Image (cartoon, rainbow, N blue to C red):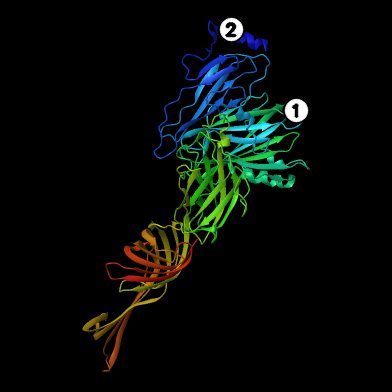
Amino acid sequence: MRPALILSGMLLTGYGIRAQAVAPADSSIRAVADSAGIRFSAPLPALKQIPGAPEPFYTHLWDFGDGHFSTEVTPTHRYADAKEHDVYLYAVNNYDDGKKPDRKKIKMPARGNNNNVASVSTAEKDFFKANGVFELKYNCMAKPNDTMVLLAGWKNTGTSEDEGKMYLFLNEKVFEQTCFENVGENKGFRFFNQGDSLVVSGSPGLMAGLEPGRQLKITESGSPPSSVVRVQNAAEAANTFLSTMMLYKSNYTIDLGKTAPGAAHFALAELKVTPEMIRDTNATVTVTGVYVPKKGNPVMHRLNIPVVNSHDPNKMNLKGGRLGYRFLGKHKELTYKVRFQNTGKGPARRIALDITLPGDLDPQTVAVKDLAPFCPPCQVGVEKLGCWELEKKAQGLLFTLHGIYLPGTNQKGVDDKDSTKGFMEFFIVTKKRLDPLPFKARTAIYFDKNEPILTNYATGRFKKGISPIVMAGFEKAWGRERVSDGLVTGLALAPLAPFRPFLQLEFYYKQGLKTNAGHYVQERAGVIPVERQKEIVYNKVDSTAINRISQVKLIPVQLRHNFGNYFSAGAGLSVTANMGGDVETGLTFYGISANGTTGEVYRRERNEKIKAFSNIRLQPFIDLQLGKVKLGPHLGVRYYYNNKKTGYGFLYAGWRF
């Protein structure tokens, strides 16, 4: 204690021990030395409450630059070594209408202490709640075009010194967008333990699996952690490692230096949440980390991060909220998670979640998957104390935690902010196959007898996709122009199961069949010159035409609408061109022959070949379909018309994939 007394004496003034500022004058972080260490603080912008929301507040993450951190508002930290340190403050505004404050930084001059032992904050002591060995945490939820800090911590629970590797996986492939980007030097990572470093090249070696006899522990959290812990043997773990690697676009390998028995080390990564982050701000993204020590068993931890448009700790999410309609089953299982935080000045003893669900979900199929604070279900006839109760209503749920203790963020002596949070996760099954329409759920959260806090709408949406369509049928021609019946095959592209009017593109080929295009008889007298100086007199003409014309047809413009699941109508414009075939015409002349009998006196025939891409014309049409018009088989009828009163009737069968 003698060096500490000397340091204190240096700070004495005439009226006792006074704090001495050690931060640069131009820094917004204030650092004051006293007998306990360095006390940090920082002025932050005034908060503006969102109408109807609870009182706004800031959460803090202090990075002291030596591998230690704190979530207190004004923490005090004692350094173990006499070195310069970069201190960072990440503040997050909750229930506030303003912008999140920028990261603050200060360079601390070298200051040691008497025993070369750094102080450990409450946040560090309470870090390993999920499994006691390895965990990931975030300082704020993922808001597009914002930044967040990912904290990773690992602990040597063995009896001898150990080292190993850590693997981090970001940016799930299930989302088209890149959700996170690394910012700053060293890809945004900051390491503090000697020997910790990012492996710049190479791919993760997890596929090699584990040594026989080792086990993999798998945990999950989304602040606070889940109570579910899974354990896999070496063979199962190898498959889990491989499938995990396949789920992500970005992976990082980190070499970990030596860790003493019982010691814990931390690293952090500063990430930018891209502006193109999932547009659905009630979705959840997952970051996965794997800690593989040389001597102990590996641990995998999955961190669920909600996507938000504002920093609101009371949140409802639909896991996998972007659904694929093409392979959607009749009874789809959906997983919802309701997060809540007590922001009061005292503990909450009763928490009720009044959940409103879409009508297509069946409340009778609800099952609770996980919850925090963890407690058993209430028993009939027993006092409701330290348990949960679920009431299933016609179109919703009432989930109640009875007789629990959830501290408040403004409660005296509460430094661990995670202890003020809770969640309830449940799954529910649909009554029938969902229509491809957005569906919403919402929760009213009651803390004791206070007014309810309404969460966001957890909205389920369907992924946009392209639906290929195959069609085949028979086309019947009407009119006196060069038309013919034919067998038609076609391909089309349209949006997948749209519920609004949509455009559809089509292309067809028609194989023309021999078609009698007309048979006309005219009573008309005349003379036909047949040979030189020879004429044939007639008084009636019989004309015939037989067409066999193949065509291609492009429909660049068609507007359709599905009226429910089994009826669809459309109209558009087609561009048709003749591609081949022939037109056979015949003229038969009747009159009085040389022997005085009445009958055929002469016949003239002609065969005309059709040129490719000839007789290009535009034709409007109308169309009706019956069947599974959103996805599956259907029957259709269509009529094409043009100003020459030449039309086609098209009867066809189709299949939308």
Pointer 1 or 2: first along the chain: 2
Element carrying mark 1? loop
Look at 63% across and 22% down and name the residue there.
119
Kindly indicate the quadrant of the structure image that contains residue 268: top right
Disc nearest the viewer among 1 and 2 = 2
**Measured along the vertical axis of the image, is residue 77 above or below residue 418?**
above
Q: Quadrant of residue 68?
A: top right
Instruction: Find the distance from the CA under tag 1 to the CA under tag 2.
Output: 39 Å
**The N terminus sits in image quarter:** top right
**What residue does disc 2 label?**
10
Residue type beneath disc 2: Met
Q: Position of residue 436 (x, y in %)?
A: 46, 57
> Which image quadrant is residue 108 in?
top right
The foreground one among 311 and 17 is 17
Of 43 and 603, the residue lying toward us: 43
Judged from the image, the secondary structure of the residue bearing numbered disc 2 is helix
Along the viewing direction, whichever of 613 and 269 lies nearer the viewer: 269
Q: Which mark is residue 21?
A: none
**Residue positioned most to the left:** 525
**Left of 270 or right of it: where is 292?**
right
Q: Position of residue 483 (x, y in %)?
A: 35, 71
Q: Residues within 10 Å of mark 1 (few under 14, many from 20)?
A: some
The residue carrying mark 1 is: 161
In the displayed structure, does residue 216 sit left or right of residue 503?
A: right
**Amino acid type at mark 1:** Glu
Image position, residue 141 (x, y; %) = 51, 37
Q: Position of residue 486 (x, y in %)?
A: 41, 72
* Vertical placement of residue 595 versus 602, above or below: below
